[in-house]
Amino acid sequence: MDQQRRRRRKRIKKCRLCEMKIEYVDYKDIRLLSDYLNEKGKIIPKRVTGNCAKHQRMIKVAIKRARHMALLPYIKM
């Protein structure tokens, strides 16, 4: 019963891109974009990364553009 009372508070995640004051996410910035891909090449969701909605949309579009230009893989085997 004591364990049920002592619940952990969720740590509020901050948007890393807002803290770095990034206005636009460029599709050529592969180092930044690869931080938002998991080991299989899928885009990590907003609830995991803690991004705001605006920056998560920018990351999504930039990753899709980079994949189309063959800078990032669609999947990693």
Image (tube, helix red, strand yellow):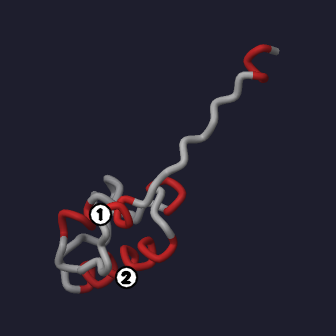
Q: Is 43 on the left-hand or right-hand side of 33?
A: right
Residue farthest to the top? 2
Identify which residue, 61 or 20, lies in the foreground.
20
Is 28 positioned to the left or the right of 62 in the image? left
Quarter-of-image position of residue 63: bottom left
Q: Residue at x 73, y 18 (%)?
A: 3
> At which x and y percent is residue 46?
50, 62
Residue 25 x/y as whole percent: 29, 77
Residue located beneath label 1 in the image: 20
Q: Is disc 2 surrounded by few (<14), some (14 to 19) or many (20+) residues within 10 Å? A: some
Q: Which mark is residue 58?
A: none
Q: Estimate the spatial distance between the alpha carbons at disc 2 and disc 1, rounded to whole Å.
A: 19 Å
In the displayed structure, 69 sits above or below 7; it is below
The disc labelled 1 sits on which kind of residue? Met
Q: Could you say where residue 58 lies in the image, as x and y percent from the top left?
A: 38, 79
Disc 2 residue type (three-letter): Val
Q: Which mark is residue 61?
A: 2
Q: Nearer the viewer, mark 2 or mark 1?
A: 1
User: Where does residue 15 sit, x and y in percent of width and height?
Assistant: 43, 60
Q: Earlier in the sequence, mark 2 or mark 1?
A: 1
Q: Is residue 10 left or right of residue 14?
A: right
Quadrant into which the N terminus falls: top right
Which residue: 27% across, 67% down? Answer: 33
Q: Residue 29 or 65: which is nearer the viewer?
A: 29
Crowding around mark 1 (Cα neighbors within 10 Å: few <14, some 14 to 19, many 20+) is few
- Seen as rendered, the residue at the extreme right is 1
Q: Secondary structure at mark 1?
A: loop
